[in-house]
Amino acid sequence: MVLFVLERASRHSVAESWRRLTDWPRHADVVPLTRVTVRTPPPTREGTVFVARSGLGALAFDDPMEVVAWRPPGDGSPGTCRLVKRGTFVTGWAEFEVHPAEGGGSRAVWREDLSVRGLPGFADRPLRWSARWMFGRAMDGLLGRGEDTGRERRAQQG
């Protein structure tokens, strides 16, 4: 089991950063070899379930998640979302918080407690490193730091 925390500054408002981080299908644009399917009707709320399917062919796995806390930002308060991973292979939880930043923009915090069934304890360090790298890149892509996501490029071209 690995616990990690990521933090990113964003030029976007709290509301826009929140929208970007909680647009579940958009996560597939920034996480390679992943598709995201939302299984409950919109809007997102406590009880929303979605599945990230990652990998190729026989090496793919489902990572079902349920939103168990949902407090969008408003009236100067930060937004908070907590997910519980309900899969048989990947378990744990993730939390997003989006706060106003001094001088404008926002600050996003991503906390995750990740466990992969059957993975021995000595693999925790490489799992933590790879998860921090992958989710850090996902945050950068979702918040528009660096390259635009494929969806944004297609919208700009179309």
Image: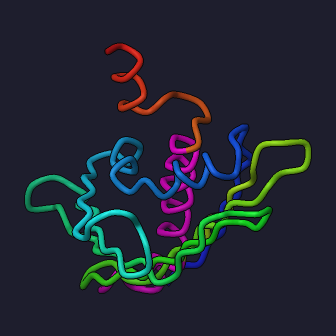
Farthest residue, direction left: 58
Which SS type dominates the magenta stretch? Answer: helix
- Is 139 drawn above or below residue 147 in the view shown? below
- Give residue 73's position: percent from left, percent from top: 66, 63
Q: Does residue 148 lie above or below 69 as drawn?
A: above
Q: Residue at x 53, y 51 (%)?
A: 19
Examine the structure image and report whether residue 124 is included in the region drawn in magenta: yes
Residue located 46% across and 77% down the image:
83
Query: What is the total number of numbered labels drawn onto the structure image?
Result: 0
In the drawing, does residue 50 fall left or right of residue 140? left
Residue 5 lies in quadrant: bottom right
Say above or below: 53 vs 145.
Answer: below
Residue 25 shown in magenta: no
Residue closest to the eye, 74 or 118: 74
Question: Residue 54's x, y, as percent?
Answer: 25, 58
User: In the rendered view, would you say 30 is above or below 150?
Assistant: below
| Rendered location of residue 111, percent (x, y) | 61, 71
Picture quadrant of residue 13:
top right
* Magenta-highlighted residues: 113-142
> Where's the C terminus, which quadrant?
top left
Q: Quick check: 42 left or right of 102? A: left
